[in-house]
Image (cartoon, grey):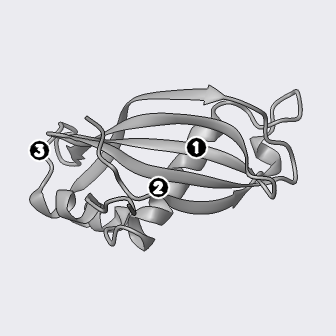
Protein backbone atom coordinates (compact mmCIF):
# COMPACT_ATOMS: atom_id res chain seq x y z
CA UNK A 1 0.00 0.00 0.00
CA UNK A 2 1.46 3.34 -1.02
CA UNK A 3 1.55 6.32 1.29
CA UNK A 4 0.21 9.52 -0.34
CA UNK A 5 3.18 11.66 0.60
CA UNK A 6 3.51 15.29 -0.41
CA UNK A 7 5.69 15.95 -3.46
CA UNK A 8 8.66 18.29 -2.99
CA UNK A 9 10.86 19.85 -5.67
CA UNK A 10 14.51 20.86 -5.86
CA UNK A 11 16.14 22.58 -8.85
CA UNK A 12 19.62 21.51 -9.93
CA UNK A 13 21.90 22.07 -12.93
CA UNK A 14 24.01 19.70 -15.01
CA UNK A 15 27.72 20.13 -14.33
CA UNK A 16 30.55 19.39 -16.80
CA UNK A 17 31.78 16.45 -14.71
CA UNK A 18 28.31 14.83 -14.93
CA UNK A 19 28.77 14.06 -18.65
CA UNK A 20 29.77 10.75 -20.21
CA UNK A 21 31.60 10.08 -23.50
CA UNK A 22 28.38 10.71 -25.44
CA UNK A 23 28.07 14.25 -23.99
CA UNK A 24 24.95 13.58 -21.94
CA UNK A 25 24.58 12.93 -18.22
CA UNK A 26 26.03 9.58 -17.16
CA UNK A 27 23.39 7.16 -15.88
CA UNK A 28 24.90 7.04 -12.37
CA UNK A 29 24.56 10.82 -11.91
CA UNK A 30 20.76 10.69 -11.86
CA UNK A 31 20.81 8.96 -8.48
CA UNK A 32 23.31 11.61 -7.31
CA UNK A 33 20.72 14.25 -8.27
CA UNK A 34 18.07 12.41 -6.23
CA UNK A 35 20.42 12.27 -3.24
CA UNK A 36 21.20 16.00 -3.49
CA UNK A 37 17.47 16.76 -3.68
CA UNK A 38 16.72 14.54 -0.69
CA UNK A 39 19.37 16.32 1.43
CA UNK A 40 17.79 19.66 0.52
CA UNK A 41 14.24 18.45 1.12
CA UNK A 42 15.02 16.67 4.40
CA UNK A 43 16.03 20.00 5.91
CA UNK A 44 13.76 22.42 4.04
CA UNK A 45 10.55 20.38 3.75
CA UNK A 46 10.59 17.70 6.47
CA UNK A 47 12.35 19.70 9.17
CA UNK A 48 14.91 16.99 9.93
CA UNK A 49 18.23 17.39 8.11
CA UNK A 50 20.83 14.72 7.45
CA UNK A 51 23.06 16.53 9.95
CA UNK A 52 20.38 16.06 12.62
CA UNK A 53 20.25 12.33 11.89
CA UNK A 54 24.04 12.13 12.10
CA UNK A 55 24.06 14.02 15.42
CA UNK A 56 21.73 11.29 16.72
CA UNK A 57 24.14 8.61 15.43
CA UNK A 58 21.86 7.68 12.51
CA UNK A 59 22.22 7.57 8.74
CA UNK A 60 20.32 6.53 5.63
CA UNK A 61 21.59 3.93 3.15
CA UNK A 62 20.09 2.82 -0.15
CA UNK A 63 18.86 -0.77 0.06
CA UNK A 64 17.67 -0.95 -3.56
CA UNK A 65 16.73 1.37 -6.37
CA UNK A 66 15.00 1.40 -9.74
CA UNK A 67 15.33 3.99 -12.47
CA UNK A 68 13.72 4.25 -15.90
CA UNK A 69 15.41 6.63 -18.31
CA UNK A 70 13.14 8.57 -20.68
CA UNK A 71 15.34 11.25 -22.26
CA UNK A 72 18.89 12.41 -21.52
CA UNK A 73 19.97 15.58 -19.81
CA UNK A 74 22.81 17.51 -21.45
CA UNK A 75 25.39 20.15 -20.59
CA UNK A 76 23.88 23.50 -19.70
CA UNK A 77 20.45 22.09 -18.87
CA UNK A 78 18.66 22.54 -15.58
CA UNK A 79 16.23 20.14 -13.96
CA UNK A 80 13.75 19.80 -11.15
CA UNK A 81 13.95 16.69 -8.96
CA UNK A 82 10.54 15.78 -7.54
CA UNK A 83 10.31 13.29 -4.66
CA UNK A 84 7.78 11.96 -2.19
CA UNK A 85 7.67 9.33 0.51
CA UNK A 86 5.78 6.48 -1.13
CA UNK A 87 5.80 3.93 1.69
CA UNK A 88 7.10 3.27 5.20
CA UNK A 89 8.85 0.12 6.35
CA UNK A 90 9.80 -0.97 9.86
CA UNK A 91 13.35 0.28 9.25
CA UNK A 92 13.03 2.68 6.34
CA UNK A 93 11.12 4.42 3.57
CA UNK A 94 10.47 4.09 -0.15
CA UNK A 95 11.04 7.36 -1.99
CA UNK A 96 9.47 7.88 -5.43
CA UNK A 97 11.21 10.37 -7.72
CA UNK A 98 11.16 11.90 -11.15
CA UNK A 99 13.56 14.29 -12.82
CA UNK A 100 12.09 16.85 -15.18
CA UNK A 101 14.13 18.85 -17.68
CA UNK A 102 13.66 22.61 -17.44
CA UNK A 103 12.12 24.75 -18.75
CA UNK A 104 9.77 22.37 -20.63
CA UNK A 105 9.37 19.97 -17.66
CA UNK A 106 9.67 16.93 -19.92
CA UNK A 107 10.40 13.80 -17.92
CA UNK A 108 14.02 12.71 -18.06
CA UNK A 109 13.64 9.73 -15.72
CA UNK A 110 11.56 8.27 -12.91
CA UNK A 111 12.02 5.63 -10.28
CA UNK A 112 12.25 4.85 -6.60
CA UNK A 113 14.76 4.12 -3.85
CA UNK A 114 14.30 2.08 -0.69
CA UNK A 115 16.29 3.73 2.12
CA UNK A 116 17.14 1.95 5.37
CA UNK A 117 17.85 3.84 8.60
CA UNK A 118 21.04 2.56 10.22
CA UNK A 119 23.01 3.11 13.39
CA UNK A 120 26.29 4.81 12.47
CA UNK A 121 27.99 2.97 15.35
CA UNK A 122 27.06 -0.53 14.13
CA UNK A 123 26.04 -0.04 10.49
CA UNK A 124 22.95 -2.14 11.21
CA UNK A 125 19.35 -1.28 10.42
CA UNK A 126 17.21 0.13 13.23
CA UNK A 127 13.47 0.59 13.66
CA UNK A 128 12.24 4.02 12.57
CA UNK A 129 11.83 6.24 15.64
CA UNK A 130 8.31 7.68 16.09
CA UNK A 131 9.77 11.20 15.64
CA UNK A 132 11.04 10.32 12.17
CA UNK A 133 7.76 8.72 11.10
CA UNK A 134 5.83 11.77 12.34
CA UNK A 135 8.05 14.30 10.53
CA UNK A 136 8.07 12.29 7.31
CA UNK A 137 4.30 11.70 7.30
CA UNK A 138 3.47 14.79 5.29
CA UNK A 139 0.42 13.89 3.20
CA UNK A 140 -0.27 14.94 -0.36
CA UNK A 141 -2.78 17.68 -0.98
CA UNK A 142 -6.21 16.27 -1.82
Q: Identify which residue is drawn at 75% across, 43% down.
A: 18
Closest to the observer, 9 or 125: 9
Question: Tag 3's secondary structure?
Answer: loop
Residue 110's image quarter?
Answer: top right
Q: Identify which residue is drawn at 51% across, 49% down.
A: 35
Q: Is residue 72 above or below residue 99?
A: above
Quarter of the figure that contains the C terminus: bottom left
How many residues crowd around disc 2 within 10 Å: few (fewer than 14), some, or many (20 or more)? Answer: many
Closest to the observer, 123 or 138: 138
Q: Is residue 9 left or right of residue 53?
A: right
How many residues crowd around disc 3 within 10 Å: few (fewer than 14), some, or many (20 or more)? Answer: few
Tell me which label, 2 or 3, sits earlier in the chain: 2
**Residue with the mark numbered 2:** 38
Q: How many marks?
A: 3
Question: Tag 1's secondary structure?
Answer: strand
Q: CA distance from mark 2 to mark 1?
A: 12 Å
Tag of residue 98:
1
Residue 125's image quarter?
Answer: top left
| Residue 123 percent location from the top left of the image | 22, 39
Q: Is residue 104 left or right of residue 28?
A: right
Marks 2, 1: nearer the viewer: 1
How many residues crowd around disc 1 within 10 Å: few (fewer than 14), some, or many (20 or more)? Answer: many
Q: Identify which residue is drawn at 52% across, 34% down.
A: 111
Q: CA distance from mark 2 to mark 3?
A: 20 Å
| Residue 44 percent location from the top left of the image | 44, 72
Tell me which label, 3 or 1, sits earlier in the chain: 1
**Residue with the mark numbered 3:** 127
| Residue 61 percent location from the top left of the image | 34, 40
Q: Residue furthest front?
A: 142
Q: Is residue 80 left or right of residue 129?
A: right
Q: Is residue 48 above or below residue 122?
A: below
Quarter of the figure that contains the N terminus: top left
Amino acid sequence: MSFPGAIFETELAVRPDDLDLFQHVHSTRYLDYVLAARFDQMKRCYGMSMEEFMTQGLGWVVRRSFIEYKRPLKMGECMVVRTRIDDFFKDGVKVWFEILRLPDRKQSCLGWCDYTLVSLATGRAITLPAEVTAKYSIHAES
